[in-house]
Image (cartoon, rainbow, N blue to C red):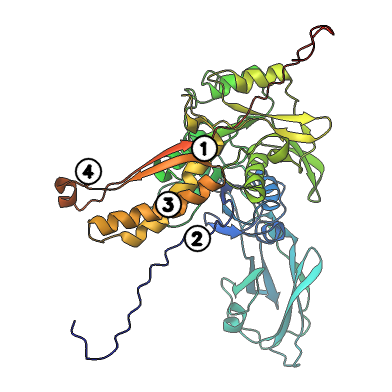
Amino acid sequence: MAYPVGVIQRTFDESLYETAPSGTILGVVGVAHKGPINVRTEITSPSEYVATFGLPTTQLGCAAMQFLRCSSNLIVVRVEDGSAAAATVDIVNNLTSILTVTAKTKGTWGNDLSVETVVAEDGVAGHVNIKVYYQGVLMREHANVDGFTAAAALDDDLVDFAQASGSPAWPAAWTGEYRTYTLASGASGTSAVDTDFIGTAAVEPTTPATGLHLFDNPEDCDIDLVACPGESDKDVVAALLLLAGVTRQDCIALIDPPDNLTRDEAKQWVNGTYAGGPPAALNDRFGTTSYPWHFYIDEYSPDGVWVAPSGPLAAVIANSEKESNPFMAPAGRKRGLHKFTSELRWNPSKPDQVSMYSIAGQNINPWVKLRDAGIVLRGQKTLQRTATALDRLSAQRTLLYAQKKLDRLAQNFEFDKSNEKTWGNLIDACKLVLDPIRGDGGIYDYRVQCDDKLNTAAVRDRNEIMSKVFVQFEKDGEWIFIDWVVRSYSAGLE
């Protein structure tokens, strides 16, 4: 463009920077006693989970409680078996049903709700005050309700009001009809099966996704870990690994073997030789598993409950990444200590740990109860069987972390010209991501290539920009050898 004579000031924004990590994000699918069904719901604290999904007494709830004590980034998908129902009751006047009161969400929690009609504050005969109770405690009072429209518009986070079926008209007077009504017939649908957890893929724009398929699109939500706590059905396992490693390729599936397996049975299950288990050996860098199950007690489960290891594993990974970074192994006394469970179904001995983890081709990360420390994760393998850097969680998490960061930065160059300036910008973006990771010990070294050797004329004619990132990972010391050499007095110590 042409500029007038004089001083011309221009600003060029080259302040590209890497955004700070937001903390480990876990996506979970499971059953609960209340709350939205087949909807992604973000939960940031234990109290918010209880308020939204009810008492955390299911495998989903117990896993959520443990994870939320280490991270505030939980995304819950509640599923049900088709029998879930919202508790309901009709408010009656002069032997005629007037208003139908329905719990906000389906579940047995609604059977603890009740409503009471009382004399209206303004004294008008055709008006009524409605009190809402939960477990006998007054939660809401709606004053001077004067018709069906006003009742339907009431702002209440526990119940909805609607004109009862067949109701002829709003009463001219409520005198003598004041009483308490208890909601009933609420059902949670907690006997969900594999197809409920897996769900169905979306058919846009008419049919929404359900179950695990609600996590299909990385553009919709970001997750680092995904689990169906306590679900060991082979089809659910396959769906988890498909979601993490094929559909998204940016998260890790936490796989739960069934409870009450021996060491050898747990190995058979993971290795694809256990009756009713996975039909082939689990072999995927986008998945990991640990064993055995844990005993968990909290204020909501005072008698304790045996919980699947995916909940403790998610909590340990989140705590490790919060206290250090995503590049360190979430295992051992320093970063693998789990404070929220008290016992293991059985405590793996040293030979058990060797058999489950230390032998080539065995990929179960053992939980161990140490007499002077508590319950500790002593392993960090992915389910990948080939011995490469990515058969370890620390390397796989580092790679996924770097890929996500670089993806966000590289989007700044979409539809830019394929020339040396854009290539250089891509290299600079890689450095912004990888230099801090190298500084924190996540990788040993790296090299980025984005030049005319990769971006030939044919590549540029296809509207593509090619680059390569070469990475060397730091190795974790999983086996520490201390050799004691006893020398004779005359031989000395040199």
Q: CA distance from mark 1 to mark 3?
A: 18 Å
Q: CA distance from mark 3 to mark 2?
A: 14 Å
Residue 19 is marked as 2
Residue at the spot of label 3: 431
Vertical placement of residue 350 versus 450, above or below: above
Quadrant in the picture for residue 288:
top right
Q: Return the disc, 4 or 2, that comes first in the chain's sequence.
A: 2
Vertical placement of residue 469 versus 170, above or below: above
Q: Return the disc, 4 or 3, that comes first in the chain's sequence.
A: 3
In the image, taking residue 391 as reference, residue 145 lies left or right, namely right
Q: CA distance from mark 4 to mark 2?
A: 31 Å
Q: Return the disc, 2 or 1, that comes first in the chain's sequence.
A: 2
Which of pointers 1 and 3 indicates the residue nearer the eye?
3
Q: Secondary structure at mark 4?
A: loop
Q: CA distance from mark 2 to mark 1?
A: 21 Å
Residue at the spot of label 1: 395
Residue 289 is marked as none
| Count of number-bearing discs | 4
Amino acid type indicated by mark 3: Lys
Which of pointers 3 and 2 indicates the residue nearer the eye?
3
Residue at the spot of label 4: 453
Binning the other alpha carbons within 10 Å of mark 1 as few (below 14), some (14 to 19) or many (20 upward) gives many
Q: CA distance from mark 4 to mark 3?
A: 20 Å
Amino acid type indicated by mark 1: Ala
Binning the other alpha carbons within 10 Å of mark 4 as few (below 14), some (14 to 19) or many (20 upward) gives few
